[in-house]
Amino acid sequence: MLSKAFKALGSALTLWGALTMCGHAAELKVCAVPQLYLALEHLHGVLPHDFTARYDTPNALTERLMAAADTTSECDLLLSSDERLPITLIRAKKGLGSAMLPFTRAPLVLWSADPALFAGNPLGSKPTSDAPVDTTCAMPEDILAERPQHAPDPWDEPAPTTTKSPESMTQAEWDRYVNTILLSAAHSDTNEELYQALKQVKLSSLAYADAHLTPVGYAARQVMTDSRKIKALLPSKRYRYEHEYQIYEQVRSGAVQCGLVTKPLVVESAHPSTVRGSYLTIPRRVHADIQYYVLLMEQSKDKVEAQELMRSLRHDAKVQAILNHYGFAPLAPEEP
């Protein structure tokens, strides 16, 4: 009789434990770049598992995760604005190579704090309120303090030539040669839509990111080498910065008239479907996609839940709608 009672009690405890475990899903830890702040904070309760998010620049995330002996204290998932950070972690055996996937992209825009600059332009935005601009999160002071580099004119660079054979080049020489070829190859002179849009405005100064440091800079450089017709409409004063955060601050302060940045960086937190000032959307076809990647960390103890969250980021229509609301855009279908 007593034995049966103990068995019944044991079964009840086992069932209670199972129910408790099912009802208490682990809270995932997510490391993300600042551009995702607004969107990610509005995905609580939408994604299948709760999470806490930490935001930092790619360089800072790289340093912290590479230095961590056990990355479980840092994050289960990494959300990055380019592929270099997750690839670095995969090579260091801190991230799973089979679980690195793009989940959204950031449109490139030519943005100005002046609401009238692109207003009325079919590719631009309508003027919004004069409410103060909220950045996606506090920008690190050391980044904002860096001085701009006066950019050499990309069209004045000599045509790529080499007397070396590919076999005799170092890897660095080969990479530079290939990149120069790619950047100097004009897409066409038929991008009439962008050309006509730029003709409607008078540009006095322009800021853009370094092509060798970020996908934003690489995309901006492609736009600037797209067409000789477009070149003629760009201002003579051009300033190159390392990060788009610096471009944002310079344009917001009025030090530079406009800059090539990604749209999520300039959405208003109070009115996320708009931006303060005005902007011109750069057609997707004239530059490489600026994709955002999600990476599952090797040491995550909640891989099943993390993979479910990854799938939602990529495929859940409501999640994608929220991302779009905060300036991002779907990976597919391709746009003209």
Image (spheres, rainbow, N blue to C red):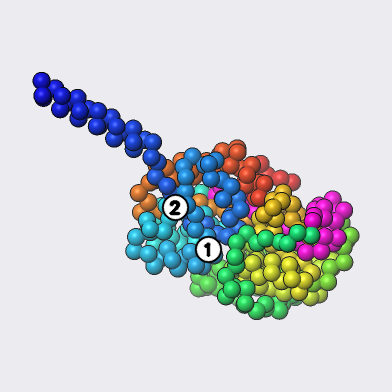
Q: According to the image, label 2 marks what residue?
A: 29
Q: Is 115 inside the magenta-drawn segment?
A: yes
Q: Nearer the viewer, residue 163 or 72?
A: 72
Instruction: Examine the image and state in which quarter residue 25 appears.
Output: top left
* Label 2: element kind: strand
Cα separation between marks 1 and 2 = 14 Å
At a point 67% along the width and 77% down the height, the residue shown is 148
Residue 23 x, y percent position in the rendering: 39, 36
Instruction: Using residue 199 as the reference point, say whether residue 39 is left or right of it.
Output: left
Q: Which mark is residue 230?
A: none
Residue at (43% x, 55% y) in the render: 75
| Residue 50 seen in the figure | yes
Q: Residues within 10 Å of mark 1 (few under 14, many from 20)?
A: some
| Magenta stretch in the rendered image | 102-129
Decide whether the magenta segment is chiefly helix, strand or loop.
loop
Q: Is residue 194 above or below residue 22?
A: below
Q: Which residue is mark 1?
A: 56
Considering only order in the chain, which callout, 2 or 1, is on the residue closer to the N terminus? Answer: 2
Secondary structure at numbered mark 1: loop
